[in-house]
Image (tube, grey):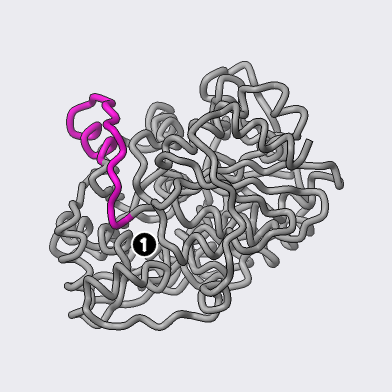
């Protein structure tokens, strides 16, 4: 498999290099030079989840890893289901929160950890990543206890839910957590700056576990196929998928799935008040604003890192721009959507509620709609209980960590302070 740097086409790497390196020169994203397509999509959809996922991953990365190795990676990474839950006669929720940290990022985090374990040959690696909520927990749990890998997670102080925070700040060992005085975009910029710093990048053997890492993206493609496999042939004919969007890795994966032959007619990029992409799709002007804090904190991203990959998919002619529409759902309608879902007998949290509301607005008569349920509602228990006026019980993974003390360190939004902290920890 060959991937090129979208900012410097002269930098071409293998899948293993892209996974280990994370970012290319000038903070460029790696993207496959060619995307594959399945000849018989019905046969692929008829397969069991793990077996199908092995086929998908093998198609994408070619013969770089043996079939046996890919099978082992997938079996260990995808040890839980991604069921479709029926909400109305023609609307489903794809529940991606049945993994160990109750969020969709368990798929990408665990897949990346297994890939790195296979290709690192025991060499020391430092994972540096920023989280707006769920990435931190998924990455921390996926890499916890792996001998040669240290993880440093940056998160915006006091801007993610307490339960989200407890899932990754309480582990310790090789998991190091830092609360930054700023927002997610500030955390993300600190990560980018570290990758541009040769002393840090080479001295600490840096790698990123954000959705910018191609392994994370590869894993996410698989659950779109799993969703469609659970629909009837008739429901697949006119399908719309609504994706709650922050850093836009999830939508990128969905579009790659479509390029590979998955029968999806349209994607809705559903955002909160941080609506850079919906505005861009309407006006053609890329104009990020200051990040606004919302109930759907994992989507509080104004300058999404993965958008260049979506632009590449469009510019290279794989899909037409009309395949995507954007929709912004404000705070009031986020709560309205949560209540509407509850009235339908489905308890959800703010991110999925935004995707549901955007889907309802876009769905036409006769179409089938899927919205992505990216996190268990208990991860946002305070918000859900306040909005719905009813208690939410904690599933075991959250109950286990709720009373533990966080081990995070507070730092200012200052790169020099972060660099000094990392070398003190790991240098």
Position of residue 42 measured from the top left corner of the image (x, y, whole percent): 47, 63
Examine the rendered structure and indicate whether residue 409 appears above or below residue 110: above
Bounds of the magenta segment = 275-296
Residue in the image at 45% along x and 37% along y: 306
- The crowd level at tag 1 (other Cα within 10 Å; few <14, some 14-19, many 20+) is many
Q: Which residue is mark 1?
A: 372
Answer above or below: position of 415 versus 41.
Answer: above
Q: Position of residue 237 (x, y in %)?
A: 30, 61
Residue 280 seen: yes
Of 115 and 234, which appears nearest the observer? 115
User: Most prominent secondary structure in the magenta stretch?
Assistant: loop
Q: Is residue 262 left or right of residue 347?
A: right
Residue appearing at x 24%, y 34% in the figure: 281
Q: Nearer the viewer, residue 45 or 180?
A: 180
Q: Residue at x 22, y 58 (%)?
A: 359
Quarter location, residue 12: top right
């Amino acid at each position: 498999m060959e991937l090129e740097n979208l900012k410097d086409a002269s930098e071409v790497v293998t899948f293993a290099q892209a996974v280990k390196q994370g970012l290319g020169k000038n903070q460029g994203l790696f993207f496959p030079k060619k995307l594959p397509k399945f000849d018989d999509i019905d046969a692929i959809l008829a397969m069991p989840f793990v077996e199908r996922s092995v086929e998908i991953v093998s198609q994408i990365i070619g013969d770089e890893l043996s079939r046996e190795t890919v099978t082992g990676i997938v079996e260990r990474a995808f040890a839980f289901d991604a069921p479709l839950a029926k909400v109305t006669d023609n609307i489903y929720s794809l529940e991606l929160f049945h993994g160990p940290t109750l969020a969709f990022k368990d798929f990408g985090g665990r897949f990346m950890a297994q890939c790195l374990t296979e290709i690192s040959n025991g060499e020391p690696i430092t994972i540096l990543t920023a989280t707006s909520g769920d990435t931190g927990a998924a990455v921390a749990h996926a890499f916890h206890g792996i001998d040669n890998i240290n993880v440093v997670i940056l998160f915006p102080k006091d801007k993610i839910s307490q339960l989200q925070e407890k899932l990754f700040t309480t582990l310790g060992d090789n998991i190091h957590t830092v609360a930054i005085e700023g927002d997610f975009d500030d955390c993300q910029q600190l990560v980018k700056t570290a990758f541009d710093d040769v002393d840090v990048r080479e001295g600490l053997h840096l790698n990123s576990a954000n959705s910018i890492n191609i392994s994370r993206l590869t894993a996410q493609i698989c659950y779109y196929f799993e969703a469609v496999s659970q629909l009837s042939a008739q429901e697949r004919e006119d399908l719309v998928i609504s994706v709650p969007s922050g850093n836009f890795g999830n939508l990128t994966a969905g579009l790659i799935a479509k390029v590979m032959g998955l029968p999806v007619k349209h994607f809705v990029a559903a955002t909160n008040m941080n609506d850079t992409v919906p505005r861009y799709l309407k006006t053609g002007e890329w104009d990020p604003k200051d990040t606004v804090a919302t109930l759907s904190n994992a989507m509080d991203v104004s300058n999404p890192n993965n958008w260049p990959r979506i632009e590449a998919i469009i510019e290279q002619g794989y899909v037409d721009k009309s395949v995507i529409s954007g929709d912004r759902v404000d705070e009031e309608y986020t709560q309205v959507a949560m209540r509407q879902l509850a009235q339908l007998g489905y308890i959800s949290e703010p991110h999925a509620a935004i995707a549901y509301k955007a889907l309802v607005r876009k769905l036409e008569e006769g179409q089938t709609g899927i919205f992505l349920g990216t996190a268990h509602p208990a991860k946002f228990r305070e918000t859900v209980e306040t909005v719905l006026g009813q208690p939410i019980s904690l599933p075991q993974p959250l109950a286990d960590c709720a009373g533990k003390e966080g081990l995070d360190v507070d730092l200012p939004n200052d790169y020099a302070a972060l660099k000094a902290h990392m070398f003190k920890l790991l240098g």
